């Protein structure tokens, strides 16, 4: 009966209302494209993070701060490396050993480097030294008179400008100086002109300068050098605290032989450069708990109970692998965006 059909809850649409048309197809395509674009826009917004900077007060109420470090001392034995902490309260904690590991870097079986010799240290120290033409003329000139065109105000600078400096300290009134003057002038001309070359132990030409100082006009310079008699002939080596006084025959050949002998003992121009790896180093890793106030952490070279360091040959060159703050910075850094990751360990990789 028809009244039963009136109870149908799933009635169908008449076919004349469900016919396909070109307008419907266009609207379908527009709807699909719109939905697709919206989907990818939302997905991109979900997957992309935007940087935002906020300035907030640190809510951490802990009284201490943890500092994590991993540092390699390239040329220092672990026995001489200490870690110290100083803070604004005046608290000093020296030679901290708790939670710190020192690992020796001895490079067994391979000669990857060696400690610097005295000559190499001097070569490295003065390798970047350069002078203008006017400065070089000043440094190469005789100190015969205070009335010439040069200043003559820094004798140490003259020594530092040459590998070796052969100096005749004299006085005008000294009869021995006047008798020796012609010999010294011949010797000075012979070496300064390059007629007689002086080489070091490796056969490299040494930068040696021969000059004389008038102790009447430059009394202060001679007093500083403790010149007690005339003539006094000394050979100065750049970077050395001591000089060699000549006591041989006062002849050109005798002076030349002395200069060649002394210069021939040194290795002045070996092409020394800063080593990537030294004979023995020390890698220091660990952490310290410090008060949350301004302060400093020191990695120091120190004497031991059995041995005192020679500070003139102490090399504190180092490389910082990491220097971070907090309980677990490594886990947190991996979650940071790449552009912010370097701020968590700004000293990493520096030397």
Image: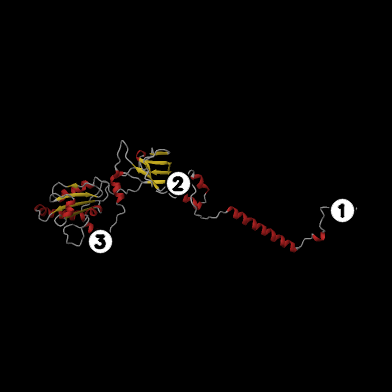
The front one of 278 and 258 is 278
- Residue annotated with mark 3: 134
Residue wearing tag 2:
324
Q: Please state the horizontal and vertical placement of residue 34, each as a whole percent of the image.
A: 67, 59
Ranked by sequence position, the earlier of labels 1 and 3 is: 1
Q: Residue at x 45, y 46 (%)?
A: 324
Query: Residue at (49%, 43%) from the top-left corner?
Result: 328
91 left or right of 197 in image: right
Structural distance between the alpha carbons of marks 3 and 2: 50 Å
* Closer to the camera in the image, 243 or 326: 326
The residue most toward the bottom is: 23
Please state which of the two labelled residues, at mark 1 or mark 3, is closer to the viewer. 1
Residue at the left extreme of this rendering: 175
Q: Which residue is mark 1?
A: 5
Q: Is residue 75 shown to the viewer in this render? A: no
* Separation of residues labelled 2 and 1 (CA atoms): 79 Å
Residue 267 appears left or right of 106: left
* Discs 3/2, front: 2
Q: Whole-Å distance between the Cαs marked 1 and 3?
A: 118 Å
| Residue 123: image location, x then y, percent | 29, 49
- The quadrant in which residue 308 appears is top left
Q: Residues within 10 Å of mark 1 (few under 14, many from 20)?
A: few
């Amino acid at each position: 009966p028809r009244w039963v059909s009136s109870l149908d809850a799933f009635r169908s649409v008449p076919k004349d209302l469900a016919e396909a048309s070109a307008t419907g197809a266009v609207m379908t395509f527009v709807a699909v494209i719109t939905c697709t674009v919206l989907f990818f826009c939302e997905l991109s917004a979900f997957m992309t993070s935007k940087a935002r900077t906020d300035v907030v007060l640190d809510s951490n109420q802990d009284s201490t701060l943890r500092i994590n470090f991993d540092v390699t001392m390239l040329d220092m034995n672990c026995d001489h490396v200490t870690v110290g902490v100083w803070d604004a309260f005046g608290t000093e904690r020296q030679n901290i050993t708790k939670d710190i590991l020192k690992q020796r870097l001895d490079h067994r079986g391979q000669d990857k480097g060696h400690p610097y010799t005295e000559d190499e240290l001097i070569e490295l120290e003065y390798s970047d030294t350069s002078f203008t033409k006017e400065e070089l003329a000043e440094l190469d000139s005789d100190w015969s008179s205070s009335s010439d065109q040069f200043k003559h105000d820094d004798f140490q600078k003259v020594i530092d400008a040459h590998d070796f400096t052969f100096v005749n300290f004299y006085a005008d009134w000294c009869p021995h100086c006047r008798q020796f003057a012609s010999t010294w002038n011949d010797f000075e001309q012979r070496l300064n002109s390059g007629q007689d070359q002086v080489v070091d132990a490796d056969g490299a030409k040494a930068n040696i300068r021969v000059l004389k100082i008038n102790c009447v006009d430059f009394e202060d310079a001679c007093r500083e050098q403790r010149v007690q008699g005339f003539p006094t002939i000394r050979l100065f080596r750049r970077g050395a605290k001591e000089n060699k006084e000549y006591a041989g025959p006062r002849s050109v050949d005798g002076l030349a032989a002395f200069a060649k002998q002394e210069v021939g003992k040194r290795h002045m121009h070996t092409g020394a450069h800063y080593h990537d790896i030294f004979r023995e180093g020390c890698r220091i890793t660990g952490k310290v708990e410090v008060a949350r106030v301004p302060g400093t952490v020191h990695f120091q070279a120190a004497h031991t109970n059995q041995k005192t360091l020679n500070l003139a040959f102490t090399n504190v060159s180092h490389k910082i692998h990491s220097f971070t703050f907090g309980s677990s910075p490594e886990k947190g850094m991996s979650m940071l965006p790449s552009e912010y990751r370097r701020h968590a360990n700004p000293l990493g990789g520096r030397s």
